[in-house]
Amino acid sequence: MGMDLIDSLVLYSGLPEEYARRRLMFLIREHGLSPEHISVNEIREVAASFLQEIILNEANEDF
């Protein structure tokens, strides 16, 4: 189930696939989680971190 969740998040993120997958895998491991066994609640936490990272990067580029 874990990789299916990751694949869905990458697909629906609207971001370049390679970038999204690489960052998500990094964040999953940074959270101490296993990509193969990540749950829906855990992927939500990782997705929130990913979104926050994107927003902060965009905000920094505006200044």
Image (spheres, helix red, strand yellow):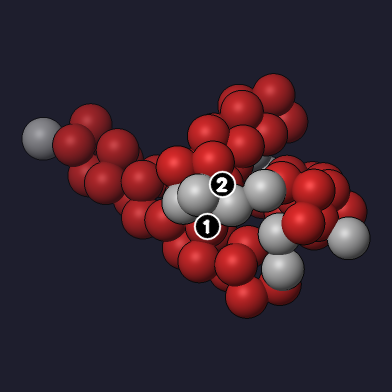
Would you place residue 43 above or below residue 28 in this image? below
Q: Which type of secondary structure does the marked residue at label 1 adopt? A: helix
In percent of width and height, residue 62 lies at 19, 37
In percent of width and height, residue 1 lies at 88, 60
In percent of width and height, residue 58 lies at 31, 40
Say which quarter of the image contains residue 47: bottom right
Q: Which type of secondary structure does the marked residue at label 2 adopt? A: helix
Query: Pointer 1: residues within 10 angstroms few (<14), some, or many (20+)?
Result: many
Q: Which residue is mark 1?
A: 46
Left or right: 13 with respect to 56?
right
Left or right: 61 with respect to 54?
left
The structure residue drawn at horizontal position 23% and vertical position 31%, both measured from the top left corner, is: 61
Amino acid beneath label 1: Val
Name the residue nearer the viewer: 61 or 20: 20
Left or right: 47 with respect to 55?
right
Q: Which residue is mark 2?
A: 28
| Disc with the residue nearer the chain's start (2 vs 1) | 2
Query: Pointer 2: residues within 10 angstroms few (<14), some, or many (20+)?
Result: many
Amino acid beneath label 2: Ile
